[in-house]
Image (tube, grey):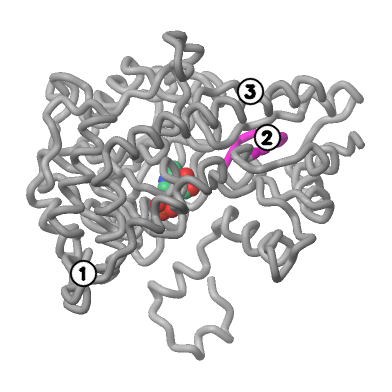
Amino acid sequence: MQDQGSISSRLSQRALDSLAAPVPLRAKLIRALPELYHPTLNPTGAINMGLAHNDLMQKDIMEKLSTCLEFQTSDLEYGDPHGSRVLRGLVADLMNRHFNPVIPLHFRNITVVPGAGAAVWQLVQSLADPGDSVMVLAPYYGNFDLDVCVSTGVKLIPIYPHHSMDGGIDMDLLNSTKIIGTKCKVLLITNPRNPHGCCYSVKDMKHLLTFASKHSLHVIFDEVYGLSTFNPIPGTESSLFEPFTSVLSIANIEQWIAPQLVHVVYGMSKDFCLNGLRLGFIVDQYNADLRSAVTLSSMFGYMSTLNDRLVCNLLKDTTWIDWFVNTNRQRLYKAYELTTKYLEQLGIEYIPSGVGPFIVVKIDRLFKNHGQEISFEIEEAIWETALLNGVYIAQGYVFHCLEPGYFRLTYSLEWDHNNLHMLWGTS
Ligand SMILES: Cc1ncc(COP(=O)(O)O)c(C=O)c1O
């Protein structure tokens, strides 16, 4: 609960509850921000390997964007709160080319919102009531603690139905999951997964859909890393890991669940290196009432007319966009190879994955080799030491990992080895 001092601010209970809710990812980011590298404010600051950002295509996207900026008199008028028809059509085309939907998407299936996080929030607003809950497959992207709970009165309940952190769904574990009364309304799934970048097999996705159907849950698939995959390896046929399959591409989905319960979140922050532009999409093909509800709520936070046109001009050049997607995959794969080779040299275990831009390392064995057990306190101390020595990384704790000793490292950077030497103390 908020302390008495805040009560004098006369905020609503809803706002006080939101402020009081624990969000480890945010708390860590707030601690790290003053230490982070900034070209003018903090040129000797820590490199940012904690946030999911991709610098590998930055020059290319900057050059392209500078040709897309355009002002028109009509920009001075109100724009379309859920995205212009042109933009929604271009997003539908993009996803038709790359996500292989069974039924091609149409502009009506897309609602534009300011970021994938906002898309999750809007969906939760429309699908669950105060006192209800959302189940999330864990470990999970820590900001869901905000996206699901802020001002909604909805609880987020992690479930852990995997054999291992990177493993597939264990049906016994899934079926033994307790559904809290009838209050659970939504199952939230990130595919490709964050933090550890693995993808669910079609078989697992069907298990999840069946489970959701049995308990009358809506399912939200957050597919925000859907085009940052390098599996099959670019330029080859070989697949090392489970490839990404969008839920939109599952044929005869009605055999597993009523399709009006299935919703997709996508956005341009990750696959297009555009965290700052705030572009997210709610994709829905079967639930017209839901689309009306999110169209209405999109009135209260929407992208500007200038941003809308900028992105239209970007997406219109489909040849360039498809080049970008393929080149990004190749560069991510090269960076992944470099990173994993380096981790192997250092003897650091990692979870192999076919998705960028981050990798999860596991350091409990380093401790076991010295007869010690890792704990969340030690994990915290390592995190702080790394930050003070020039590298911001993400602790497994902020993704609600059950065991200590995991860290997520973003490798899609212009990085040199010195910083990593600092991190692992090998210099
Ligand atoms: C799984 C997942 N969903 C949503 C988001 C938020 O994306 P956006 O910046 O578009 O709000 C992130 C950001 O890291 C993410 O990892």
The residue wearing badge 2 is: 406
Residue 217: x and y, percent?
A: 24, 38
N-term mark: 3 or 1: 1
Front position among marks 1 and 2: 1
- Place residue 131 in its image quadrant: bottom left
The answer to whether residue 298 shows anywhere in this view is: yes
Pick the residue in front: 134 or 92: 92
Give the residue displayed 31% in from the left and 53% down from the top.
Answer: 119
Q: Amino acid at mark 3?
A: Glu
Name the chief secondary structure element in magenta.
loop
Q: Distance between the Cα atoms at labels 1 and 2?
A: 40 Å
Type of amino acid under label 2: Tyr
Check disc 2: other Cα within 10 Å, few if <14, some if 14-19, many if 20+.
many
Instruction: Using the image, determine if residue 320 lies above or below residue 5.
Output: above
Q: Quick check: marks 3 and 1 in contact, CB under 8 Å?
A: no
Mark 3 / mark 2, whichever is N-terminal: 3
Location of residue 193 in the rendering, given as x and y in whole percent from the top left corner = 46, 33
Disc 3 target residue? 337
Q: Amino acid at mark 1?
A: Met
Q: Secondary structure at mark 2?
A: strand
Q: Which residues are magenta?
A: 400-409
> Which residue shows up at 40% across the image and 63% down it?
150
